[in-house]
Image: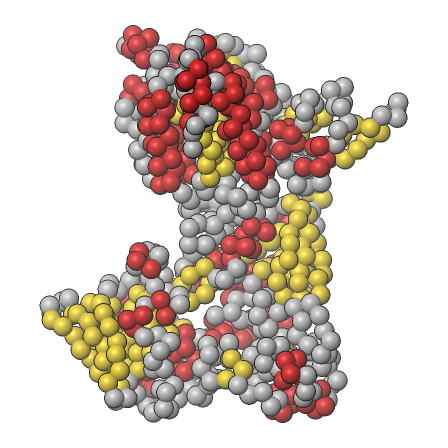
């Protein structure tokens, strides 16, 4: 084989701590290497052109590029060698930036390490063979997990693009957190007025099928052809029959049920519809508080239901949907305010979360939009908003900024002053973070136009005095202690990964970070892709963000799905396992271990059975290769010989 | 210049890392992007999944003369291929107990789980393992003549 080696300087990123010239010179000593050079930016157009020219001029049969991580530019260089007539798999990349020049400054050691890595790549390349992809058809349906604003946007865009959409929502209604909000910053437009029509669209589009009160049970398959099992949880109401008239909720005697939609403020009935604009507007029985399901007596709802929709014997049902792509938009949960014991969240009824305050402000909320205290229904005269409750605090495991709290505090304070002009609003903040179009202006308005008292500092303690609360802390700008008597304290609780986010990630085989936020494929350039092909992200499940950013990501994810589905087939990765029938001893171990069912028995002409890999199903993990006793199964492009050749290159 | 010192440095410690493409290789990239400084002894081989790891790769590397072998993949339950790292975990655990029988110090081999976001953890793993191998010194391989006491001590590891 005639091999060419190209060492990238990456400007000074590599050249600063690696002697690229020496590495190129050394490369010429490695077997089969006929050409070696270094270049300023190998990934640039002239850099790629240089590779192509060298391939022609030196009749190269294989190319090694030593540059950044192959996770970044392997596709770029594969295309480059392909353009020059080589098979795209006659290419290897040595990572001398992320793994060498960026992690140590010792030029001499780095150079030796880079030489080793190039040597390993050359030895591996010598055993490469041209590989060719095959094509499989794409199932042009998309699954959207999560019916918040990001999921809704993704689903509607996909639907507009002519795709069949399956939406799965864990709660009994779509709308997510945004449906609970009263108004949105920085325009103070009504949340349900802008979200409502989109929710209705979801229910009315013929190509969207909505599974509310359902969860993902399991996911199998791969890009273009996923098989998803969905658990439709028992609602004890036949939603095909239910009309959402609400007759049952009037008569239900179990009136002390936890009202999840109202964040636990007030209570609801055991059979309930989450809120008037719910989509689907269907009743559901809460099995934990239903008198019949817990004590065996009642069945009032069954008697009054004009549609005969009540089904007390209903059980969870598992259905299977086949889709070609998945958009994950599972959103977030609020930080548990009781973690800060000194604030008394959960102990004092008038210390509430910001989302509870949204429900208080909302006209469809438990108090009909009147700002009153949960404890005694009195109008508050002084309200304190506390920022960063569960944000930017490593001591509670939340060192990140939740990004939206500064803005929603300003919004809530402005609305408060609109409703109750005599009410004093105080905001205790660490810093104000308001980047975004018209955001800082909005906070300024809160301070200047609405006269909201911003106090920089940190609250240390909240305790009751009579029927009011004393908020004690420090004003760091004045350098004095701060004691404010308040009627109501709103904790700006931060965002955290939603309950079950990790388990779902494991089902989808996508990664998450230490806080449970899903990992995008590249933090800047691939913000809605995941490392699992065909699975895309939208909204807060990827990290804290506000509504405009969530909507943008929803649309972006939909665009990615539409791009994928713009073709009828998808090229499979040919780096798959292959069975050498003459070596196979028919033990069947590979068939047993394959996580994808990609290996099956094949009967030869003499009647003997041998293992056979289905190249379009194989995902190239190599588990069979490691398992096979006689090593008859080899993962192409990563064979035992190739790995050992790399080992040898290091040890030589 | 390099070749001069190269000869002198030929006995530099060499550690081979087998990293799964999806988690630990990405974690090592993340460490690089964040400029988390690490010792230079490690040479990384990219494999699709730790499930691809034949325990013999480790043995052969140590016999060929590598001074240490580090295997790293996705955290259990977070495997890109669902279960590959669970197979790897069993195999690597078994291998660990087997190494002393051929006269190799178990401390020369380590397996660990580092996700693509854990650059800092990766820095820590590489630094600690490199220090450990430097403490053990170069690997004499199977040629090492060993007295009975040393040979037995290989079995008394954590």
Vertical side of A190 occupied by A104: above or below: above
| Number of marks drawn | 0
Q: For residue A622, what is the image quadrant? A: top right
Vertical side of A23 occupied by A327: above or below: below
Percent position of residue A611, x then y? 76, 30
> Residue drawn 41% across and 77% down?
A356
Percent position of residue A399, x then y? 32, 56
Residue A50 appears anywhere in the view: no
Pick the quarter of the image with the C terminus of chain B.
top left
- On the rendered structure, is A231 left or right of B124? right
B36 or A544, which lies in front?
Answer: B36
> Residue drawn 25% across and 88% down?
A466
- On the rendered structure, is A605 left or right of A411? right
Residue B146 appears anywhere in the view: yes
- On the rendered structure, is A230 left or right of A403? right
Percent position of residue A62, x then y? 54, 18
> Residue drawn 34% across and 80% down?
A348
> Residue drawn 59% across and 73% down?
A172
Vertical side of A392 occupied by B106: above or below: above
- On the rendered structure, is A75 left or right of A610? left
């Amino acid at each position: 084989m005639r091999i060419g080696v190209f060492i990238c300087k990456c400007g000074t990123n590599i050249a600063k701590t690696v002697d690229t010239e020496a590495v190129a010179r050394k490369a010429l000593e490695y077997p089969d290497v006929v050409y070696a050079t270094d270049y300023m930016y190998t990934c640039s157009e002239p850099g790629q052109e240089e590779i192509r020219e060298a391939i022609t001029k030196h009749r190269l049969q294989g190319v090694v590029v030593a540059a950044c991580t192959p996770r970044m530019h392997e596709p770029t260089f594969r295309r480059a060698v392909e353009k020059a007539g080589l098979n795209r798999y006659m290419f290897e990349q040595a990572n001398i930036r992320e793994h060498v020049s960026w992690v140590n400054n010792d030029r001499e050691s780095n150079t030796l390490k880079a030489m080793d890595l190039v040597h390993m790549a050359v030895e591996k390349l010598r055993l490469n063979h041209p590989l060719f992809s095959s094509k499989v058809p794409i199932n042009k349906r998309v699954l959207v997990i999560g019916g918040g604003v990001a999921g809704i946007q993704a689903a509607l865009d996909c639907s507009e693009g002519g795709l069949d959409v399956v939406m799965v929502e864990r709660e009994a209604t779509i709308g997510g957190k945004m449906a609970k909000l009263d108004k949105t910053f920085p325009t103070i437009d009504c949340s349900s007025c802008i979200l409502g029509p989109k929710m209705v669209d979801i229910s009315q589009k013929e190509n969207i099928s909505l599974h509310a009160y359902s969860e993902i049970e399991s996911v199998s398959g791969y890009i273009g052809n996923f098989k998803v099992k969905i658990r439709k949880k028992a609602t004890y109401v036949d939603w095909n029959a239910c009309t959402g008239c609400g007759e049952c909720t009037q008569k239900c005697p179990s009136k002390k049920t936890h009202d999840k939609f109202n964040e636990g403020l007030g209570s609801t009935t055991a059979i309930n519809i989450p809120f008037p604009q719910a989509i689907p507007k269907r009743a559901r029985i809460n099995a934990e508080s239903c008198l019949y399901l817990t004590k065996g007596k009642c069945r009032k709802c069954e008697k009054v239901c004009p549609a005969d929709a009540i089904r007390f014997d209903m059980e969870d049902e598992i259905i299977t949907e086949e889709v070609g792509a998945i958009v994950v938009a599972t959103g977030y949960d609020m930080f548990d305010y009781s973690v800060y014991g000194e604030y008394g969240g959960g102990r004092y009824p008038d210390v509430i979360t910001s989302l509870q305050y949204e429900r208080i402000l909302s006209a469809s909320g438990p108090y009909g939009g009147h700002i009153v205290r949960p404890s005694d229904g009195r109008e508050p005269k002084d309200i304190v908003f506390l920022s960063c409750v569960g944000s930017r605090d490593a001591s509670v495991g939340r060192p990140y900024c939740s990004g939206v709290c500064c803005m929603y505090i300003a919004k809530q304070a402005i609305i408060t002053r609109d409703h109750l002009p005599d009410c004093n609003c105080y905001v205790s903040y660490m810093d104000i973070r308001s980047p975004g179009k018209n955001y800082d202006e909005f906070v300024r308005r809160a301070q200047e136009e609405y006269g909201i008292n911003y106090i920089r500092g940190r609250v240390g303690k909240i305790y009751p005095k009579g029927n009011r609360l004393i908020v004690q802390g420090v004003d760091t700008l004045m350098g004095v202690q701060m004691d404010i008597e308040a009627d109501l304290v709103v904790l700006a609780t931060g965002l955290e990964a939603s309950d079950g986010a990790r388990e779902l990630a494991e089902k989808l085989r996508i990664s998450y970070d230490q806080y449970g936020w899903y990992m995008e494929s590249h933090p800047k350039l691939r913000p809605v892709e995941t490392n699992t092909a065909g699975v895309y992200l939208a909204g807060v499940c990827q990290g804290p963000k506000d509504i405009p950013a969530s909507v943008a990501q929803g649309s972006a994810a939909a665009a990615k799905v539409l791009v994928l589905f713009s073709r009828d087939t998808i090229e499979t990765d040919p780096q798959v396992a292959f069975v050498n029938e003459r070596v196979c001893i028919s033990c069947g171990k590979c068939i047993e271990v394959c996580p994808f069912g990609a290996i099956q028995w094949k009967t030869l002409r003499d009647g003997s059975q041998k293992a056979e890999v289905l190249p379009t199903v194989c995902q190239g993990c190599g588990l069979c290769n490691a398992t096979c006793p006689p090593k008859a199964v080899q993962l192409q492009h990563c064979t035992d010989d190739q790995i050992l050749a790399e080992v040898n290159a290091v040890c030589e | 210049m390099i070749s001069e010192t190269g000869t002198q440095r030929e006995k530099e410690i060499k550690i081979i890392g087998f990293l799964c493409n999806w988690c630990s290789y990405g974690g090592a990239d993340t460490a690089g992007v964040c400029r988390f400084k690490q010792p230079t002894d490690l040479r990384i081989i990219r494999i699709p999944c730790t499930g691809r790891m034949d325990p013999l790769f480790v043995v052969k590397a140590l016999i060929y003369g590598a001074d240490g072998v580090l295997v790293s993949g996705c955290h259990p339950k977070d495997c890109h291929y669902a279960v590959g790292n669970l197979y790897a975990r069993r195999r690597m655990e078994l291998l660990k107990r087997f190494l002393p029988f051929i006269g190799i110090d178990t401390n020369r081999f380590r397996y660990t789980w580092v996700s693509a976001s854990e650059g800092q953890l990766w820095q820590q793993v590489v630094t600690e393992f490199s220090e450990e191998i430097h403490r053990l010194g170069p690997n004499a391989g199977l040629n090492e003549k060993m007295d009975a006491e040393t040979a037995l001590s290989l079995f008394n590891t954590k």
